[in-house]
Image (cartoon, helix red, strand yellow):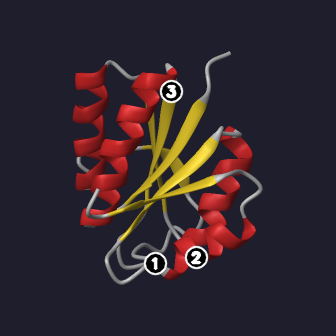
Amino acid sequence: MHPCLLLVVDDSDAALAAARYAMALAHRLDAGVRAVGVPQDGPSDDRDGVRGPCSAGAFPALGHVRRLAHLEEIKLETVEIFGETAPRVLAEAEHARPSMIIVGRAPGGVAPWAARVLKEARRPVLVVPAEH
């Protein structure tokens, strides 16, 4: 069984840096990537907790992740989640059982949801700086 990386992305520069790093790492490890699209500014939909396969263009960052995965020939699954971000990401980690969770860090630090994921995750969390 190949390892799986859980990449959490929004439309921030930090998340896009994390996506580039995750694809390079997945290529080196021969791992698959499960990319979870979250709203950049927290909950933006009344479908609290809905998760499922992404529709095309639902989250612009996921389109970028798809292109990166295609270029690196990485097996990719994409999911979009709505509602409170941290609990949804943690639930997705329990569901997917990844080798690690990958999130981005902006120059000012990680988003509040990412700080909670760092604190509560039962999987390793890799934090990629936006400057990477």
| Pointer 3 with pointer 1, Cβ within 8 A | no
Sequence-wise, the earlier of marks 3 and 1 is 3
Residue 111 at x, y percent in the picture: 45, 78
Classify mark 3: helix, strand or loop. strand
Inspect this view and state whether residue 52 appears.
Answer: yes
In front: 128, or 7? Answer: 128
Question: Mark on residue 60?
Answer: none
Q: Amino acid at mark 3?
A: Gly
For label 1, the residue is 111
Question: How far is the residue under mark 2 from the one under mark 1?
Answer: 6 Å
Callout 1, which amino acid? Ala
Q: Which residue is labeled 3 in the image?
A: 32
Q: Is residue 38 left or right of residue 5?
A: left
| Residue placed under numbered mark 2 in the picture | 115
Label 1 sits on a secondary structure element that is loop
Q: Which residue shows up at 30% across the image and 43% down it? A: 20
Give the distance between the C-alpha atoms of the residues marked 3 and 2, in whole angstroms. 25 Å
Which numbered disc, 3 or 2, marks the residue that appears first in the sequence?
Answer: 3
Bin the neighbour count of mark 2 within 10 Å (Cα to Cα): few under 14, some 14-19, many 20 and up.
some
Instruction: Name the residue rendered at 36%, 79% in the picture.
Output: 41
The quarter of the image holding the N terminus is top right
Q: Are marks 2 and 1 in contact (CB under 8 Å)?
A: yes
